[in-house]
Image (cartoon, rainbow, N blue to C red):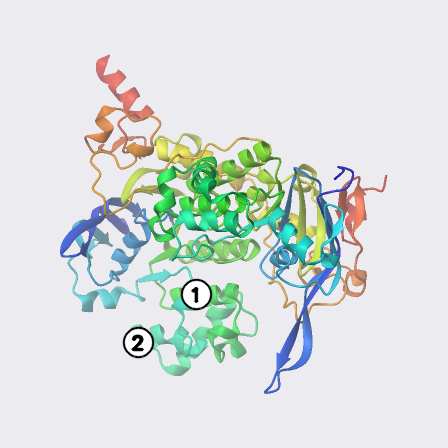
Amino acid sequence: MSDTHPLLEVDDLHVSFPIRKGFFQRTVGEVRAVNGVSFSVPRGTSFGLVGESGCGKTTVARAVLQLVEPTGGAIRFDGEDVGKMDAVALKRFRGRVQAVFQDPFSSLNPRMSTGRILSEPLRVHALKPESEIKAEVARLLDICGLPARFADLYPHEMSGGQRQRVGIARALAMNPELIVCDEAVSALDVSIQAQIINLLEDLQKEFGLTYLFIGHDLSVVRHICDQVAVMYLGRVAETAPSDPLFSNPQHPYTQALIDAVPNPDPDYEAGREIVPLEGEVPSPANPPSGCFFHPRCPRATARCRQEVPRLDPVEPGHMAACWETGALVPAS
Amino acid sequence: MTLLRVENLAIDVVRDGEPCRLVHDAHFAVDRGETLAIVGESGSGKSLTALAVMGLLGEGLSISGGGILFDGEDLTGLSPQRHNDLRGSRIAMIFQEPMTSLNPVRTIEHQLTEGMRLKNGLSRRAARARALDLLAEVGISDPARRLKQFPHQLSGGMRQRVMIAIALSCEPELILADEPTTALDVTIQAQILSLTSRLCRDHGVGLVLITHNLGIVARHAQNVAVMYGGRVVERATARQLYRDPQHPYTQGLLASVPRLDLPRDTPLSPVPGAPPDPTVVLPGCRFHPRCPKATDICSEQVPDFIAEGGHEVACWNSGIQKTKSKGAAA
């Protein structure tokens, strides 16, 4: 296919879950987990989704993986609408898109050896003849920095970092184009986390992979991703390439998130003026009016309480959904 | 007198009838109104050390050496009864997961006033009045309503605020906080940590903050002890540690974390390998299999602590040692 369109396009995605109550489980309302999210990921790049629990970032990932059904909007992969794919196309799609999850202990089957975990997709999708499977498993392990003898080990015999390497090898077995990493390094110890981040980056260079990277650690997301979207209660608050997003945040929520991350430098921290964000994320079942962020926002005005701000460009490629950004940056 | 001084603490676990050492040598000190951070990865023994101070080591675990001096009194040989008297009233603990450390079938009021009634002999009414003040102090709105609620009715951040209120309820001199914000979102994490630090400073409480997050240490602690494989390997003020880390493990940790204040393409240099299995006996320095600077002696002998200007390190090849030996030669 041509390179004119991005590999992944998410267009005005909505995902709602019904709230059921009572003996007959009648639907009494809905939780709008994802509320009109759009972004696109060019081939070979990394796109980051950040936000706090309940912001809908994982639901977006699950919708992209076809694990939840969108209630509105479209997901296009390589130019093709995933929602309109037939069974054959969908099976091919599931091979081209793979996932790496947060907890490699619960996402690897404890009763399967690494060798079986890695060879199963090869057999199911008939990617390799039986005679080559052993060599392919060894190759996958080697790519992910594990010796071939790991094929005989079970998940409980490995450390967290090694399990995550197996999780990545399993994703690579399908020779995918897009890998959805849902908090893929969040559960790992600091020294191991850096190993896995470097591995993901090396693999991207080697195989031209595209990543949709979901995380809550801003410094990790900034390090890995070329473009980042900050989500709040199911909406995108701000999106921009990593450098302008972190050096020149336009949305007060992005600013608050950056302020909340302490830097490993006592002198830097001592000189930092920090006003912690008040309050907590409201329930997505009962979101506030207007801009969802206004109850916690230090800059909220009457307009913010009433009207939902549009995601408007503040600079080329840098968009923010805030009525007050104009006050920060004079319109050019 | 130093509020808490832990010296050469060793903790063993009995497995299949054989003792196995989990903590080899923990030592650190914290004073009133001061925050000490204990940094380490999973399995480094930092939580066990805190549990030992609390007298809460579980079945099969025992202190096999060293001392825990709290306000001059050694806690290692203390009777369970005497330890129980200290716990809650003079030493309190904030645990990582407030959902599992609060009792799900008791109201917030019951859990918050229990300590005050048992330890301080407050009446139900007096304890309730103080509970309302405490909830307000930790930033919970509508305290009267919250008192009647159960933990599941509160958000994660709110539960952790209740934990802090419980810890403060008997006006302790020392609080141990074991990864108090790991399960929380970043903005809530910032709220909770600022609150804990401020309250401890205001009330002159010594705080031991156990964490794996080097940013949190830089923001909140004055002194740091770095633990690796059951041993404190470096001890310094936060400034010294970040400006001039001496142990290769500390250097490796600092080079492993991506930082918002450095250019985005700054490469990460992870520590190779994985932390040691505590059940495997490893001679010499426990970091030597992963250490880029390891020499022959590192795999043979446990390095002693060398100190210079309050900065202590246990490494055969640290800069401190070099300057020292040069001085000796001259």
Q: Chain of mark 1?
A: B
Question: Can you see residue B1?
Answer: no
Q: Chain of mark 2?
A: B
Q: Secondary structure at mark 1?
A: helix
Residue A237 at x, y percent in the picture: 71, 53
- In the image, A298: left or right of B22? right
Residue B205 at x, y percent in the picture: 37, 56
Q: Nearer the viewer, residue B168 or A265?
A: A265
Q: Nearer the viewer, residue B329 or B32?
A: B329
Indicate which disc, 1 or 2, sits on the residue closer to the N terminus.
1
The crowding category of the residue bearing disc 2, from other C-alpha atoms within 10 Å (few below 14, some 14 to 19, many at least 20), is some
Residue B292 at x, y percent in the picture: 35, 27
Q: Nearer the viewer, residue B190 or A177?
A: A177
Residue B24 at x, y percent in the picture: 22, 44
In 3D space, how far apart are the residues under numbered discs 1 and 2 (Cα atoms)? 22 Å
Looking at the image, which residue is at 52% across and 41% down?
A: A263
Q: Which residue is mark 1?
A: B98
Q: Which residue is mark 2?
A: B118
User: Do the numbered discs 1 and 2 sit on residues whose CB atoms are within 8 Å?
Assistant: no
Nearer the viewer's eye, disc 1 or disc 2? 1
Q: Quadrant of residue B122?
A: bottom left
Q: Label 2 sits on what residue type?
A: Leu
Looking at the image, which residue is at 32% across and 30% down?
A: B309
Q: Secondary structure at mark 2?
A: helix
